[in-house]
């Protein structure tokens, strides 16, 4: 059995599209669980639950995304759990490539491919296009070599029996799960055909809020002390520079790429101060990013 687990918080305008993107491609013996705490999102989900028996709403205690995921996983009945968010749209042909690699018993998780829908002709949109393309190339290369790779929290699947408790102060729950899978001795595969459309931040403040939260997860001991590595400031310099410099198509985009290098240094400095030095709690670092909704 397969469980699709969507977490959503204050996303009544987008959660319906997230649910609808899954419905046409659902196989038999599947459940679609949406974990949300707020009344507006819950009302939308319950409307779908009345129309589609496969959809079920779970009320979570509003203690952050890791707690919501733990809550949903306790209710999940599937052997394979597919994780996604309430503000993204999964491509209509994503589920089959996402679950097919599990035919190999040594595969513990499979990552989908985020695709930016933000326009390339704006600074922040260009950054999002560059970063998702770089992540795609890194995942594809590591998958081809049989190396460890990180799942994307926007869309990935994992074997339920390999998932332990997610620390409820974890900033990057997808990284925590990826490391749990690898440390259990299982391989993580990449399914680039399993695409998920993502809207990225449109302001620099929102960009920093989102990136400090996600990159900060790699500075926490849950991930930093793992023997497996894919993402860090050092890896970004080694792997990312070449990919970034190959991406621009004109002088303006090259200038935007140089600005991105400066922004990433700003980001990692904030991660060091807020996560490593002052150890700010999840409640302080997990700030809502309105421009992605």
Image (tube, rainbow, N blue to C red):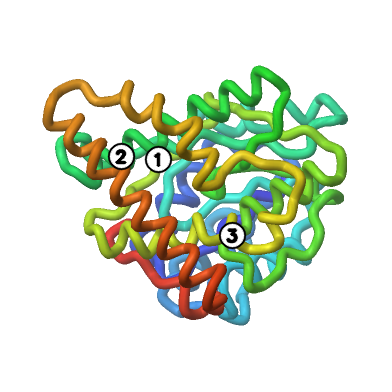
The residue sitting at 37% across, 64% down in the picture is: 209
**Marks 1 and 2 in Cβ contact (< 8 Å):** yes
Would residue 53 appear left or right of 116 to someone viewing this image? right
Please name the residue that numbered disc 1 is placed on. 197
| Residue beneath the point at 53% across and 42% down | 234
Looking at the image, which is closer to me, 52 or 122? 122
Q: In whole angstroms, how far apart are the C-alphas of marks 3 and 2?
A: 28 Å
Q: Residues within 10 Å of mark 1 (few under 14, many from 20)?
A: some
Q: CA distance from mark 1 to mark 3?
A: 27 Å
Q: Residue beneath label 2, please?
A: 117
Task: Indicate which disc, 1 or 2, sits on the residue closer to the N terminus.
Answer: 2
- Mark 1 residue element: strand
Q: Residue at x 67, y 55 (%)?
A: 224
Q: Is residue 293 left or right of residue 215?
A: left
* Mark 1 or mark 3, earlier in chain: 1
Above or below for 199 versus 230: below
| Residue 253 visible in the snapshot | yes
Residue 221 in the image: x percent, y percent? 69, 63
Q: Alpha-carbon neighbours of circle 2 within 10 Å: few (<14), some, or many (≥20)?
A: some
């Amino acid at each position: 059995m397969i469980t699709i687990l969507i977490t959503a918080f204050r996303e009544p305008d987008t959660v319906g599209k997230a649910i609808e993107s899954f419905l046409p491609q659902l196989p038999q013996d599947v459940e679609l669980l949406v974990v949300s705490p707020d009344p507006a999102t819950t009302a939308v989900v319950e409307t779908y639950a009345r129309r589609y028996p496969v959809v079920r709403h779970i009320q979570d205690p509003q203690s952050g995304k890791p707690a919501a995921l733990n809550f949903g996983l306790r209710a999940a009945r599937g052997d394979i759990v597919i994780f996604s968010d309430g503000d993204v749209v999964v491509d209509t042909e994503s589920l089959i490539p996402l679950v097919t690699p599990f035919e190999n018993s040594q595969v513990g998780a499979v990552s989908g491919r985020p695709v930016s829908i933000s326009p390339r002709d704006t600074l922040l949109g260009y950054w999002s296009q560059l970063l998702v393309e770089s992540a795609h190339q890194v995942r594809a290369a590591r998958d081809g070599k049989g190396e460890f790779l990180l799942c994307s929290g926007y869309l990935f699947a994992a074997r339920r029996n390999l998932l332990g408790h997610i620390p409820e102060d974890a900033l990057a729950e997808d990284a925590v799960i990826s490391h749990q899978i690898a440390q259990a001795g299982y391989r993580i595969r990449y399914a680039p055909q399993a695409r998920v459309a993502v809207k990225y931040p449109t302001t620099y403040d929102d960009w920093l809020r989102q990136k400090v939260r996600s990159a900060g997860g790699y500075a926490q001991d849950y991930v930093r002390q793992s023997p497996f590595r894919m993402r860090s400031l050092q890896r970004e310099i080694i792997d990312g520079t070449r990919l970034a410099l190959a991406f621009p198509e004109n002088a303006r985009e090259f200038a935007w790429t140089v600005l991105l290098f400066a922004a990433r240094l700003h980001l990692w400095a904030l991660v060091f101060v807020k996560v490593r030095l002052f150890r700010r709690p999840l409640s302080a670092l997990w700030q809502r990013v309105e421009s992605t909704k």
